[in-house]
Amino acid sequence: MSAFSDQDFLATNYTSYRPAYPPSFFKKLSNYHKGDRKLAVDVGCGPGEATYPLVKYFDHVVGVDISEVMIKEASKLRKGEILQKVEFKVGSGESIPAEPHSVDLLTAAECFHWFDHEKFFQEACRVLKLGGTLAYWGYSDPVFIDYPDASLILERYVYLDPEYLGPYWEYPGTNLLKSNYRDVNIPTDRFTDIERVEHEPGTRNEDALVPGVTAQGSSSPLQIHRDIPLDFYHKYVTTWSSYHNWKKANPKSPDMADAFIKELETKMHWNPKTMVHIEWLTVLKMARKRLR
């Protein structure tokens, strides 16, 4: 995740243009959690997208990130009545700044794929209380719903064409995220009550979150979708780590994001104000630390 920790990474763009997690998702986390609600720690917090919503459910919330740039950005929202409830610290998934057996909920949003997983699980087991909750999730590969040709253009620029972003993703983390974390299992000798839920773009179902209603589409609480103008999507592309890496390697080349959006406009007959519906592939994994 070196791109996000670079001093010149535009954390303000990350805050402004990355997708937000739905409130119903945090309600799902809260319903799963059965322990105390004194302390939640959000590792890899970035600018705090998953940190601040936890304030509603826990007495105190700590956001942790390896990037001082992200910590500075996250702290901008720390004011008013939540000032005393939230704090941010520099740390990592392999070295969490928390006392042993002190954390009720440990989360990692859109960052688990960058961790040394064995060390992260060891740290999670160290800091969590008995019965405490571990939850991590991610999203990848935004799809243009109802526009498969646009998604094919996206795939070429993002992964397939070596002239563009494909070589500039950080591996193996990117592949792990694209596989929806299937290749790493939560250790069952340390955790129990393990749940894993995926969401496939195009299977959204509004009734999936209503108790007692059988979902005809996705039943995941982590359904991320947006209707945005194309120029907003353009700015979202500039928040990708691969774009940041490409820019550093090609400072004098025509901007890749500009070329990508221009091709969408030409071939799809779109313009900067065209509204597009995009949806992300997501995965959520939750577990409880064993009581013994």
Image (cartoon, rainbow, N blue to C red):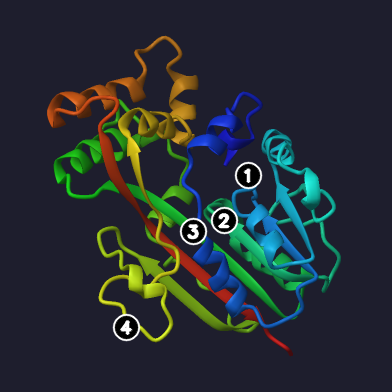
In the image, residue 214 above or below residue 279: below
Q: Which residue in the structure is indicated by mark 2?
A: 109
Residue at horizontal 53 percent and vertical 35 percent from the top: 16
Specify the farthest residue to the front.
81
**How far separated are the C-alphas under marks 1 and 3?**
17 Å
In the image, residue 280 above or below residue 260: below
Decide which of 278, 68 is in the foreground and name it: 278
Residue at horizontal 58 percent and vertical 28 percent from the top: 10
**How far separated are the C-alphas under marks 2 and 3?**
13 Å
Q: Which residue in the structure is indicated by mark 1?
A: 46
In the image, residue 283 above or below residue 143: below
In the image, residue 76 above or below residue 223: above
Q: Which residue in the structure is indicated by mark 4?
A: 214
Of circles 4 and 2, the one toward us is: 4
Q: Earlier in the sequence, mark 1 or mark 2?
A: 1
Crowding at dot 4, Cα within 10 Å, few <14 / some 14-19 / many 20+, comes out as few
Image location of residue 12, percent across then percent down: 59, 31
* Residue 137: numbered disc: none
Residue at horizontal 50 percent and vertical 66 percent from the top: 24
**How far separated are the C-alphas under marks 1 and 4?**
35 Å
Crowding at dot 3, Cα within 10 Å, few <14 / some 14-19 / many 20+, comes out as some
**How far separated are the C-alphas under marks 4 and 2?**
27 Å
* Residue 22: numbered disc: 3
Say what secondary structure mark 4 lies in: loop
Residue type (three-letter) at the residue carrying disc 2: Ala
User: Is 74 displayed left or right of 149 in the figure?
Assistant: right
**Quarter-wise, where is residue 79 in the image?**
top right
Say what secondary structure mark 1 lies in: loop
Q: Earlier in the sequence, mark 1 or mark 4?
A: 1
Decide which of 273, 186 is in the foreground and name it: 273
**Quarter-wise, where is residue 260 in the image?**
top left
Residue type (three-letter) at the residue carrying disc 4: Thr
